[in-house]
Amino acid sequence: MNLSDLTALLSELSQVDAPSGHEGPLRAWLQAHLPPHTTARTDGLGNLIVTPADASSVEALVVAPLDEVGFLAQPGPAPGWMRLAPLGPAPTPGPASARVRFAGGARGVLTRDPAAGQAQGWDAWLCDVGEEPVPVGQAAVWDTEPVVQTGRVLGKAVGVRAALLAAYLTLHTAQPRRPTAWVFAARERVPGRGSAPAALGLDPTYALRVVPAPAGDEPGRRIPGLRLAAGPGLRRHEWGRAADARLVGWLTRLARDARLAFQDEVPREREPSWASLPLVAAGVSTVTLSIPTRNLYAAHQAVAVSDVLAAARWLQAALEAQGDPLA
Amino acid sequence: MSADFPSLSRRAHRELRELTEAVAVSGHEGPARAIVRRALRGVAARITTDALGNLLVHRPAQRTRPRPLRVLLAAHLDEVGFMITHRAGEGLYRIRPIGGLRAATALGQAVWVGPERQPGVIGAAPIHLLRGARLPTWDDLRLDVGPHARVELGQRATFATPFRREGDTIFAKALDDRVGVVTLLELVRHAPPHLDLWAAFTVQEEVGLRGARVAAHAVQPDLAFALDCTHARDLPGPEGRENPAFNTRLGHGPAIYIADRMTLSDPRLVRHLRATAERLGLPYQFRQAGGGSTDAGAMHVQLRGIPSVSVSVPARGLHTPISTLRVSDWNATFRLLWAALDALTPALLEQDL
């Protein structure tokens, strides 16, 4: 797949709405676009688990998020006005406004509540839905159309979709040397930790995660972080838990052999789904690749398509590599 | 639906009184467990206590083909309270909270210590001596039980609040979650015969949902319900302004959870509860999404994922010396849960999430 096709696919995926716990549309999209000779099932939490049709056991997992941050409609102070509860770490719009769209089709505009004073957080915001009926509890996402710039896509959910896309591409391209399952994990933006129950059912030896990570390349930043278009991040450390050093070393060697650009990453913020996999059952050795994303979880995010392609190639190289990655 | 649509029995009210007046703080749930075990005598074929102290009760389905749904209902036995940690003089002890309690809430309160409910007081200074004083911390507080009390370090204590009912309102301590426990007792008594029903009276919920985790692992259910009691912060805002963070409201029926700090409820179960309530004309409300958690937070991520939902009776003043609930909300909660269980079929889990 070339960069142009990848850009179009990322734009398309960013518009398939899948807030945490309501991932049905994206699950359906994936199921309709699976390669032949694979089987897919949905577990009790909504994880989509894809394996080769003839697989009897699993040694390696490729894990990517299915969900994006979103909102739940809450009662408001007057007809036509709702409040929103965030699903995941959705930042408030700051001084500006923003638009959301609800699962039922209604749209709303976020407005700062004049009665909130100096209060921060989502209680200080109202959602103007006009005469559109929105039942309490209905899910919503940022209402942002994707914008394609040279080499990158701007829009809502492009960070998580970029991670998903990297994993999805390997479903079509990789010829794994070991029995492999792909887990498109639900509820990862909230502390639901969808991938952990999926791993318990599959009992893998190791897992390769792909996640979005906040970029830190704005000018003037005192401590620079991940840069856009400089390759995916390789997480040297998980918040509160060490990354598996064997897998980190193995992936580093593979990237150098294949001349793939990558960046070392030591996260400064806790990821919502941090470090749940390594503790499953007798333990799953886990390593994380990250896609640098500007304004992660906000209404307008930015991702470099070359980073997605590099992550997919890196994953493919890992799945097709000879030898034991845990040796 | 089965022919009889049950309501809460008088026995349920007696049990709630007895349970709310028991001292059963997290880790020392024995007194509440004993009451529940006694209440279930002759009702369930199999009652076991697991290694953590969960009381697991099984009501098998009356038919085994086709395979009945295995449903786990959980309500927690434990309450928030105090642990006695150090001697601080004759009849005086330092205390620490068990679960979510603020030191300021304990100031000047009468307490019961241990299963025997020995009386004690967490002393407070008179207002004359408190000018400009900051709010107390746990290090400032002392439990005064008098010189002749038999108190041991590690013992638990709770607020000494007698149960009281006035019309539709109940005032008591530990309604979180003794009201869920009694609701669960009633559901076990009226178990729909087509379900393979497991009830878990769980321990250590208030200190990290610990009991429910192992209970779900042991039972391996197809789906799970957490029965709890949630905050109603429904007092009006200052100057009559909107209170945007009411969580739930008294008198508006059972609170169905869509999302809390630990769980996104299974949307199929949320839809099922809502449809059941609307079909029967039962009141219900959606709890505001956000903080807090229930046993569902631990259960839904066990094994390969267990579809779970929470339903709570709303109450004011939880995690304080005295809480308030409406009997009408409690009865509607029981009826909604019973009707929802009665209408449960395996087809529910075949719906898209």
Image (cartoon, coloured by chain):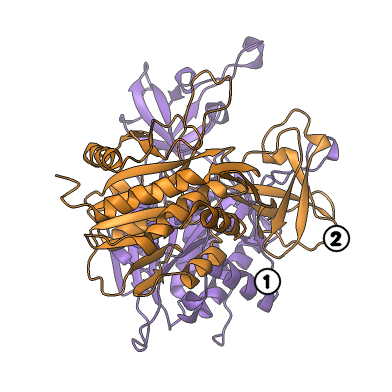
Q: How many marks?
A: 2
Which residue does the image show at 52% across and 65% down from the upper left? B12
Provide the residue designation for mark 2: A131
Q: Considering the numbered disc 1 on the image, is that residue within a helix, a strand or a loop? A: loop
Q: Which is more foreground, mark 2 or mark 1?
A: 2
Provide the residue designation for mark 1: B282
- Which chain is tinted purple? B
- On residue B43, which mark appears? none
Report x, y in % for residue A60: 26, 56
Up-down relation of residue B83 to residue B308 (above or below): above
Which residue does the image show at 43% across and 61% down from the upper left? B74
Q: What quarter of the picture does the C terminus of chain A occupy?
A: top left
- Which chain is tinted orange? A
Q: Considering the numbered disc 2 on the image, is that residue within a helix, a strand or a loop? A: loop
Report x, y in % for residue B256: 60, 61
Report x, y in % for residue B24: 40, 46
What's the chain of the residue with tag 2?
Answer: A
Task: Residue type at mark 1: give it.
Answer: Leu
